[in-house]
Image (cartoon, rainbow, N blue to C red):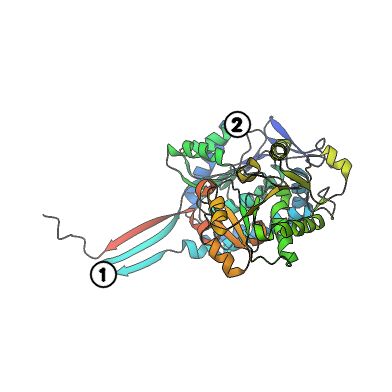
Amino acid sequence: MTEPITVHAIINGKEAPTDKQFARENPTHPEEVVGYAPINTKEEAIQAIDAAHEAFKEWRLSDLEDRIQRMERAIQKIKDETPEIAKLLSREHGKALWDAEGEIAISLMWMEFACKTVKEVVTEELREHDNGRTIITKDPLGVVSAITPWNYPISLSTIKIAPALLTGNTMVLKPSPFAPLAVSKVVQLIANEFPPGVLNLIHGEADVGVELTSNEKVAKIAFTGGTKTAKSIMKAASETIKKMTLELGGNDAAIVLPSFDLTDTKAIRRMVISNFLTSGQICMIAKRIYVHSSIYDEFVEKYKEAANKWIRVGDPFNPETTVGPVNNKGQVNYVKGLIDGAKSKGAEVIPLGKVLNPELMENGYFLQPTLVLGADPHDPIVVEEQFGPTVPIIPFDDEEQVIELHNESIYGLTSSVWGEEEHALSVARRIEAGTTMINTAAVQGLDVRFPFGGVKQSGVGREYGKEGLQSYTETHVINIPKTLDLPYIPE
């Protein structure tokens, strides 16, 4: 058993030890403590915000090349320590080691793109016209509060850190208590490359979150998490009209058209991975599958075959493992409740994949992946975000029906359409979602060069792409007119 580590808050460039701590257990072996993180206070949150506010006065005027070079040094530090960070992430989170390494790779990919692209975003524009000159600049906003979740703690933190700091903002970041350790290590590596106060790290409970979302010195909130929490954040932020980027819940659908090629085993494998990667705990994962009735029976058989080949449930450090435990006991109980509810209404629940170590399954936060057949399209297992290793397959008869079933959801994060390309594209154009993928889904179809975010109650604003960088800037128009006296105003 590895010795537990301890992480600290970072306020104004210094570690801020505190007497109150909480333990983070290993979801694979819940009796093992992976490490300890602080329970910071509201007062410490205010100190972090004040430090960021003071640092912003100089940082906003810093040279862009210097900001890029600092971020590039941080990127290299993360690359150098990736093996150890990935092991720590796997132990505290439960995701397979290769999955943890993949999360770090996506994070670095985005940070590198942000470094290469930020000049395009913040370079000022000069427009000369018949009444003089107008200069349009992209100015930093100020202090950004970032609140991040446990499912992809590193990538969903760096998705905020990189654009905020590169565009001249400062930040206070609060990670989830369900995965606080590896992300703290990454934040520390980045913070070390920047002046004190530019990047601060705080842990804590609800009072800390309230302070980060209501403090008058905070200019923007960047939040990834549940829609219910986001509603509280919007209320808290309304008093001072803060800018916001909110990436929220999703109930992402996969629509399989009658033109889908059932002999395409790679495509069906992509579908399986899009359902069960990271034990189904991804906001953009395909959480419900609609299959045209004409191919439904054959698709289900092909899907089970592919799932039973790919899914291997076990210890995240076992190289054979593709699906590890669920992150926490509360999530296990929530997903079990959805499955039990579907069973009680007559749905068939089919276990999928191979369990590599049955004894481990009994002791850890494991759920064997399941396929749910025969659920009503409006049952909770279908309309709610499961965020766990289970997926329902529902038949449909025509395109109008499935588009209506898709669009009646309160969510609209991502979606996918599977079939002949032009046919799939025609359906995709009628879907209400922030991103729709053709013949792929979830992380497999993610491209950091393009904007990502949701519609309806799946969020506000966009991350990734140029748009993700622009969201941390404010447009500033400077007019220099030739004619200062306006003829229609009397003397």
Q: Please tell me whether residue 345 is drawn above or below residue 89 in the rendered image.
A: above
Depth check, front residue: 452 or 290? 290
Indicate left or right for 45 with 394 as reference. Answer: left
| Residue type highlighted by circle 1 | Asp
Q: Residues within 10 Å of mark 2 (few under 14, many from 20)?
A: some
For the point 54% across and 34% down, the residue is: 210
Dividing the picture into quarters, in which one does residue 340 lie? top right
Question: Extreme left residue here?
Answer: 491
Mark 2 to mark 1: distance in Å?
Answer: 57 Å
- Residue 285 coordinates in the image, percent (x, y): 65, 52
Q: Which residue is mark 1?
A: 130
Q: Is residue 424 visible?
A: yes
**Secondary element at image label 1:** loop
For the point 82% across and 35% down, the residue is: 31
**Secondary element at image label 2:** loop
Q: Are marks 2 and 1 in contact (CB under 8 Å)?
A: no
- Residue 50 coordinates in the image, percent (x, y): 52, 39
- Residue 312 coordinates in the image, percent (x, y): 82, 52
Q: Mark 2 vs mark 1: which is more N-terminal?
A: 2
Indicate left or right for 236 with 375 as reference. Answer: left
- Residue 377 coordinates in the image, percent (x, y): 61, 46
Q: Quadrant of the C terminus?
A: bottom left
Depth check, front residue: 388 or 115? 388
Question: Extreme top residue here?
Answer: 19
Dividing the picture into quarters, in which one does residue 92 lie? top right
Depth check, front residue: 95 or 378? 378
Depth check, front residue: 170 or 241? 241
Q: Which residue is mark 2?
A: 41
Indicate left or right for 130 with 125 as reference. Answer: left
| Residue type highlighted by circle 2 | Thr
